[in-house]
Amino acid sequence: MKINKVLLLIGSVLLTMYSFGQQADLRLSAVYSAEEIHKLKQSAPDAINYFNFYVNNSYIITDFVADKPMDYKELHKINPQTKEVLSDDIRTSDIIDFNPYLFDCTPDMDKRTYYKMGNSGKLLIMLSRKEIDKKFRIKNKTN
């Protein structure tokens, strides 16, 4: 009887840990409804892991150096559903809790893409799709 309780407790802890690991980053709600996120958790938990990874690891934000020659685009806020450009006004809060789904920044397959973040003095570097996928595979091998 005591063994059954211990096994039940261990099973509960493992199930809780698994469920916690499948939590969606709140920034995903910009493009997915709560129902869509729930369905993804059930049918494609690896997709949630990848989307969480993407929203946190697909970019680098650094200082913009105006006198350094580089090919960059201006970053614009967009409506994530329609892709309509809403604004090019980038606020500090946008940078602190950056959500790539809310901006017109998409990774190129093979090379990094650079975006000037309005008048913030910051530069967004979108990693290539290959870099993102490689980092994701490495992270999953170590976890």
Image: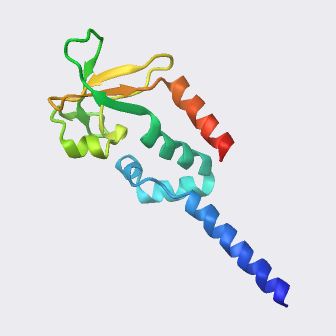
Question: Image point 56% across, 47% down: which residue?
Answer: 49
Q: Is residue 97 left or right of residue 22?
A: left
**Residue 29: where, in percent of width, then height?**
38, 52
**Residue 34: where, in percent of width, then height?**
43, 59
- Decide if residue 44 is in sight here: no
Question: Image point 65% across, 47% down: which residue?
Answer: 143
- Decide if residue 90 is in sight here: yes
Q: Residue furthest top?
A: 69
Q: Is residue 129 left or right of residue 7?
A: left
Quadrant position of the N terminus in the picture: bottom right
Number of labels in the image equals: 0
Q: Image height check: is 78 above or below 108?
A: below
Q: Is residue 23 left or right of residue 71?
A: right
Question: Image point 52% across, 30% down: which residue?
Answer: 132
The colour mode here is rainbow
**Residue 12: where, in percent of width, then height?**
68, 75
Q: Image height check: is 89 above or below 109?
A: below
Question: Image point 22% across, 46% down: which residue?
Answer: 93
**Residue 126: where, in percent of width, then height?**
39, 27
Residue 26: quarter of image: bottom left
In-front residue for pair 28/21: 21
Q: Image height check: is 40 above or below 7?
A: above
